[in-house]
């Protein structure tokens, strides 16, 4: 036995891991002991392996699946993808916290709302289903499927978020024939334009629906968002989103 190797218990203690975790990492080939006693099967680790052990532990805390950790440790591009995801999640939480502070300090928004006749639109769309709290990432995936486009992208959502999973879509207007097309009928709509992060959209929606209900209108159909300035070209504070809610033929 090489003297500088550490028994599994001491190595686990040093790396703030459990021996159960180390055995599991060994079974997966993520962190193989430097030496295994042929008689007892006891595992021994080199102190230099602490770097890899800690990296695995930190990646797990960042919710990187065990199946992807080995690749992430060997490929900087894969690791960078995971780190970018984490940074985006952190920034999303920061913007959400700012939206909460704004709500608590300034109260509900009073949206400038327009009542208008919306023309019929034919959108070639990409669809998916998601949980109500996963709408943002789901729409982002749909957008990637229909981009690049010359005109503004649209997001389509159910008005009610009661179901465990809901259908959402993103699309762009088209005159071309096709089967994967969503036809949005012409009709009366209430709409407002929001400038700022997507995390603030909930506040804008509340202001829009408040305006609708105060005036006795009844929403119908699919909610629509037109992304007039999206994240590909604009900073979060400069995003421009038009929210359009169709109305039943009105009490004008």
Image (spheres, helix red, strand yellow):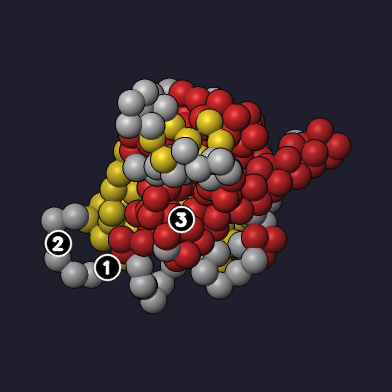
Instruction: State the SS at label 1.
Output: loop
Q: Position of residue 64 (x, y in %)?
A: 46, 43
- Dot 3 alpha-carbon crowd within 10 angstroms: few under 14, some 14 to 19, many 20 or more: some
Q: Position of residue 175 (x, y in %)?
A: 23, 70
- Dot 2 alpha-carbon crowd within 10 angstroms: few under 14, some 14 to 19, many 20 or more: few
Picture disc at residue 178: 2
Q: Residue at x 55, y 64 (%)?
A: 231
Q: Position of residue 200 (x, y in %)?
A: 65, 46
Q: Looking at the image, which is closer to me, 215 or 71?
A: 71
Tell me if label 1 and label 3 are in contact, CB under 8 Å: no
Instruction: State the SS at label 2.
Output: loop
Q: Looking at the image, which is closer to me, 153 or 6?
A: 6
Q: Nearer the viewer, mark 1 or mark 3?
A: 3
Residue matched to label 1: 174
Q: Residue at x 55, y 55 (%)?
A: 83
Cα distance between the residues tagged 2 and 3: 44 Å
Instruction: State the SS at label 3.
Output: helix
Q: Looking at the image, which is closer to me, 151 or 233?
A: 233
Tell me if label 2 and label 1 are in contact, CB under 8 Å: yes
Q: Is residue 105 left or right of residue 110?
A: right
Q: Is residue 241 left or right of residue 95?
A: left
Locate residue 209: give its quadrant.
top right
- Dot 1 alpha-carbon crowd within 10 angstroms: few under 14, some 14 to 19, many 20 or more: some
Q: Residue at x 57, y 50 (%)?
A: 48
Residue matched to label 3: 73
Above or below, 94 against 194 in this view is above
């Amino acid at each position: 036995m090489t003297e500088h190797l550490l028994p599994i218990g001491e190595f686990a203690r040093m790396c703030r891991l459990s021996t159960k975790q180390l055995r599991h990492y060994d079974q997966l080939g993520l962190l193989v002991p430097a030496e295994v006693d042929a008689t007892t099967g006891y595992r021994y680790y080199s102190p230099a392996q602490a770097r890899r052990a800690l990296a695995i532990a930190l990646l797990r805390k960042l919710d990187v699946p065990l199946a992807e950790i080995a690749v992430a440790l060997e490929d900087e591009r894969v690791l960078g993808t995971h780190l970018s995801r984490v940074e985006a999640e952190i920034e999303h939480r920061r913007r959400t916290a700012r939206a909460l502070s704004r709500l608590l300090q300034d109260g509900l928004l009073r949206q400038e709302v327009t009542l208008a006749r919306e023309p019929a639109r034919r959108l070639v769309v990409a669809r998916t289903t998601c949980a109500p709290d996963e709408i943002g990432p789901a729409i982002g995936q749909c957008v990637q499927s229909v981009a690049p486009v010359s005109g503004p992208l649209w997001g389509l959502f159910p008005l009610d978020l009661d179901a465990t999973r809901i259908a959402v879509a993103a699309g762009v207007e088209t005159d071309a024939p096709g089967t994967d097309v969503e036809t949005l009928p012409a009709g009366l709509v209430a709409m407002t334009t929001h400038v700022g992060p997507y995390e603030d959209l909930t506040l804008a929606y509340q202001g829009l629906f408040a305006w609708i209900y105060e005036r006795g209108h009844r929403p119908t159909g699919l909610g629509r968002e037109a992304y007039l300035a999206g994240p590909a070209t604009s900073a979060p504070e400069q995003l421009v989103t038009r929210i359009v809610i169709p109305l039943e033929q009105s009490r004008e």
